[in-house]
Each structure stands twice: as C-alpha cells, then as structure tokens.
Image (tube, rainbow, N blue to C red):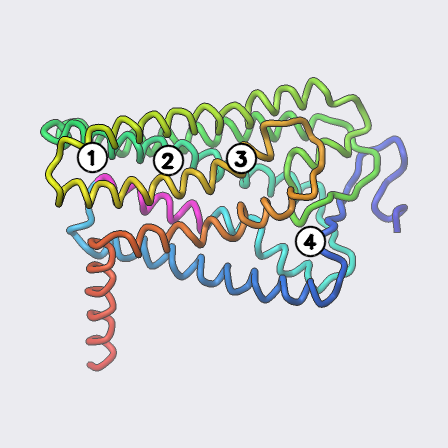
Amino acid sequence: MEEAVLLNQTTSVTYFQLRGLSVNQKVQMATFAMFLIFYILTLTGNILIVITIIYDPWLHTPMYFFLSNLSFIDVCHSTVTVPKMLVDTWSEEKFISFGACVTQMFFLHLFACTEIFLLIVMAYDRYVAICKPLQYVTVMNWKVCVLLAVALWTGGTIHSIALTSLTIKLPYCGPYEIDNFFCDVPQVIKLACTDTYIIEILIVSNSGLIPVVCFVVLVVSYTVILVSLRQQISEGRQKALSTCAAHLTVVILFLGHCIFIYSRPSTSLPEDKVVSVFFAAVTPLLNPIIYTLRNKDMKNALNKLMGMMERREKK
C-alpha cells in the first residue's frame, strides 16, 4: 500500500493518510452520529441567523452585519473539515491527496484567521456603541463596516497564503500518516523529510502570536467596556452585559483552541484531537446558540420569520 502512496523515497508524497479519531468501530459510529448531528445543527442555525438578519430591517445594524459574517464563516469553517471526516468514518483507508490536504489547510486558516479578526471588529463595534454612543452612527457607518469587512477577509487571506506557502515548499518523502481527522499545518510539517525548526518558529510567531495578541486586545477591550457600563442605567447596562458576555464566550472558546495548538512547536499531545473536535464541530454550533438564546432582538426576529413562514404554508 505504501508503494501506491509514495512515488519513491526521494520524490514527494502524493497522498496522506488520516488516522481519524479512533480505530474502534463502535467509537467511529458514535462519532459519525455526533458529528452529523452537530453539522446539521451548525448549518441550520447559522444559515437561519443569516436569513433572519437579511429579512428583518430592524437588524440592519453594524452589530448584526458582523454577526451575519460570523455565521457565514462558521458554516464555511465547519464545512472544510466535517464532511470529509463523515465520509472517512466509512473508510478503512482515510486517504487525502496532497492537493486536497493543502486546500483544506488553506481554507481552514482562511476562515479561522478571518474569524479572529472579526471578533476584534465586533469588540470595537461594542466599544463604540457602549463607550461613545453619541458618535456611534458617525463612526460605524456602512462605509466603515464594509471597509472593515474587506480588511478582515483580506487579512485572513494573506495569513493563509503565507502559512500554506511555508508548508507546501517543504519536501515530503514519507512517512505520510497524519495523526488527526483533518489536515493542519502542525501535523503536516512533522512529516517533512527535512529540519523544520525554522518553519515551526515562523508558524508559532504567525499563527501562535495572532490569537495571543488578539486575545489580550479583546480582554482589555471588554474590561474597558465593563468599567464603562458601571456608569449606565440598569436597563441599558443589562442588555450590554448580555451582549458582551456572549462575545466573550465565543472569544474564549475559539481563541483557546488557536492558542493551545499554534503557540507551541509541532509536538503531539493527547488532548490535541479533543481540542480539534471543539474547534471544527462544537464552536461553530455554539455560536448561533449563544447569540440567539442571549439576544432578545434575534429571538423576536426569528419568531417573526417563523410566523411569516407558517402563514405562507397555510395559504
């Protein structure tokens, strides 16, 4: 089988083999069912949020514009890894071509980095809304929102291109087994048949530094916001606290994975796969739950959308 995967010991690998989460068949079946349910709920929840925000004119505000971007990213982010994992559950030989592996890494980091930048922008939006409410309409106008959206997607693209370029330039001549259920940079560069110390340092300084710096910035931002909330009336303060709590929950869940995986050299830990499951399948599902269950405006808009759909069905 190895001869079919490797051209020879001096040329590049044409395929990688994913180990998956477990070799136990019962565990694989349970994992398949869990991931399938999570994926369906992720698609349903996030797509419903996007449709609701588009449908309801009361939600045509900067905060919900960025929230719709977050939901779109979560749909794309989970789609990069979960469908392949579901298909591989039924396969003993979980092969992925070198090109498909590179593509998966590119889009994985594109959506992950874009989401990190988006969380920063969402924190800035809340900061202006809470700390400088009289200037909010001027500062966060639609031109600024569009420019911020373009900037965060551009930043994510540049980051992903740089990281993927570092990976594909390495020589791969075996082994070819990736200890995960999807391709990611730390696991792939371990398979390079050359010294990758410098590359690992570059990856840590890139993918590791971005989430750490962003996490610090976000914590400082929300600390300033919470201090500012002490001077506001109780009703407005309660709504702002609820929004900030939702944002902080997403920040901790998402950036926690990025810091854990990318802020250290490419060494495997037993916890890596568990953290990867949360990153790929759980966090994209929790985002719509967190934002809809804790947000009165979203719940009202969803109820109106459901009511409209029911009336159409009766007609």
Q: Residues within 10 Å of mark 2 (few under 14, many from 20)?
A: many
Left/right of residue 176 with respect to residue 140 in the rendered view: right
Residue 76 lies, with reference to residue 158, above or below; the image says below
Element class at badge 1: helix
Q: Residue at label 4? A: 21
The image shows residue 51 at horizontal and vertical percentages of 29, 57
The image shows residue 56 at horizontal and vertical percentages of 19, 55
Give whichever of 90, 231 is nearer the camera: 231
Inter-mark Cα distance, 4 to 2? 29 Å
Label whose residue precedes the other's in the sequence (2 or 3): 2
| Magenta-drawn segment | 62-75
Front label number (3 vs 1): 3
Q: Residues within 10 Å of mark 3 (few under 14, many from 20)?
A: many
Q: Residue at label 3? A: 258
Element class at badge 4: loop
Q: Residue at label 2? A: 119
Residue 78 lies, with reference to residue 222, above or below; the image says below
Label whose residue precedes the other's in the sequence (4 or 2): 4
Front label number (4 vs 1): 4
**Which SS does the magenta portion mostly show?**
helix
Left/right of residue 286 with respect to residue 27 in the rendered view: left
Q: Residues within 10 Å of mark 1 (few under 14, many from 20)?
A: some
Left/right of residue 90 with respect to residue 76 in the rendered view: right
Label whose residue precedes the other's in the sequence (2 or 1): 2
Residue type, numbered disc 4: Leu
Residue type, numbered disc 1: Trp
Q: Residue at x 42, y 52 (%)?
A: 286
